[in-house]
Amino acid sequence: MITVSGITKRYGRKTAVEDITFDLTSGRVTGFVGPNGAGKSTTMRAMVGLIRPDGGEVRYHGALYRSLAQPARVVGSVLDARCMHPGRTARNHLRAMAAASRVPSQRVGAVLDEVGLGAAAGQRVGGFSLGMRQRLALAGALLGEPQALLLDEPSNGLDPDGIRWLRNHLRSFADKGGTVLVSSHLIAELSIFADDLVVVGAGKLIAADSMAAITSRHETTVVVETPRPGDLARELAALGLSVEIDGTRLRVQGTTKTLVSQVAYDNGIQVFELSETVRSLEDSLIEMTRASAEYASA
Amino acid sequence: MTTTLTPVGAYTEGNQHRPATRTKTSDLKAVPAALKSEWRKVSSVRTYRAILALTAVGGFLLSGAIARFTTDQAMYIAEVGFYWTGAGAIFAAVVGVLMFTSEGQHGTLAVTLTAQPARWVIAASKAAMAAATGAVIGAVAIAAGFAGSAVAGIEMGDTSSVVAMTLWAVLYTGLSAVLGLGTGMVIRHSAAAVTGILVWGPVIEGLLPLVLPVQVARFLPFLAGSRLVGWLDDTPGAEAVALTEPQAALVFGGYALLALTIGTLLLSRREA
């Protein structure tokens, strides 16, 4: 269990994150989403002790990160895949990391093979594409065979095949009991393999829940046109549904057209048009974070 | 808002162990590993090898040229061989600077800090590696100086103090690298810190004795340090108040320790 409790960080008058609280549990992939400047990276850097929060704390099975004797055994992190000396080979980059983490250097070859960089082990990092650097950074995170992975935008620079590989890898890691927190702008991608979501906006927590719970908040909208909108709206509202009336049209949230047509039929209400729209997770999250987006499209 | 996500999967809280936490003993045990990591870093990039090569070639050529072309006084290998050590000390300081600033420049400092939360362990291992690397640069500078002057064909001269002077010289370059490391930890910017060292050492400390009393000038960092290789400021009266080698080592080592201490405090307090 990783517990993030009330993380707050201010830079002068600007509050980067405020009271961010969520838990991460074993065996699950948690997506960390939010618009640019929402505080995802700040939170993740606070989680591994790179920044000192003004309030709150992060505990790994009860222990603070800075108190861990061998952090690499507990949590592997990738916060910026560009953090490598360009003149060093992939193998030497990992050897230095392994030594610092007190991990046997034999792990270097194993993780390079695991991320598909075995053939590039002797190449200098300066010649690597961003996708190769992402793989190498992930190899570094895996060196200590950690229980948890914290990855900030790990799919940046990966080609479609690489993204699929990463998705499968993280899913497999979680299925073996590991904990994964992965931030990404690719919400559609996250929706494929994440179990839970933490949504932040303007430095504040907007939601932390299972993927199913978050998608169900904005599930389907049924549009129905009827000559008796008031009557049908009353019957639907009696079932606890949210109904908006727009002339002869009703917009009903969180239901299905089967149910709406059944209610209309049961009450003898004629229906001219009936359609159902399922909103994507991406739409839902954009709506959730719209008010807090620092940079938004017109 | 606090939401606890439902745990599923193979792991349950029951079969996870609380991770081992740091103690003073575990931090001490981490130092050799951190030192090994620093060695991996230093030995795996070309910059340091290039500086070592420059030290060797420069020392060979300079001492060879001095031995070959100085005609107004008798020159001996046992003296000329140490002439390049001052430059070696500057190179060592540059290496010390880069051992920290290149980590910041390439972002690997964050990787280092996440691997080892005990920041004093990082500072200590970097200081030890800087001292060792600086000492190697000093040894190479002396070896190159001896080789260059020997090839020029001059006589060996009095060798009675060569061993002692070599040890002082290696101490000088080793401490110089630590001074550079501390400077890099404070300034954190490669170009600024290297420029600062290059301007302060050869230029400003070359000019300050002209305006400072000799009793004060002898305590300038590199002027004090260069006493360890027998160099003496030619300002009138300087010889009378010159520091002995142990005194010079204390003064120069004090500067190195001060820079390293400030750098370590900043490393502990600053965010990466």
Image (cartoon, coloured by chain):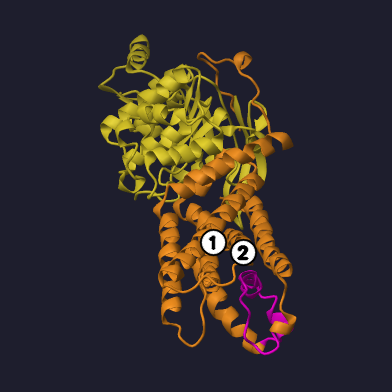
Chain colours: A yellow, B orange
Which region shows up in magenta?
B212-238
Q: Is residue A13 magenta?
A: no
Residue at 60%, 42% (x, y): give it. A49
Q: x, y (%) of residue A13? A: 61, 57
Q: CA distance from mark 2 to mark 1?
A: 8 Å
Mark yes or no: residue A195 visible. Answer: yes
Kind of residue at badge 2: Tyr
Q: x, y (%) of residue B124? A: 64, 49
Q: Nearer the viewer, residue A118 or B113?
A: A118
Q: Circle 1 is placed at which residue position?
A: B138
The answer to whether marks 2 and 1 mark residues whose Cβ atoms lie closer than 8 Å is: yes
- Taking the image as drawn, is residue B116 in sight? no
Q: Earlier in the sequence, mark 2 or mark 1?
A: 1
Tag 2, which secondary structure?
helix
Badge count:
2
Image height of B41 relative to A65, above or below: below
Q: Residue at x 46, y 48 (%)?
A: B43
Tell me which amino acid carries mark 1. Answer: Gly
Q: Which residue is mark 2?
A: B172
Q: Is residue B214 magenta?
A: yes
Same chain under badges 2 and 1? The reply is yes
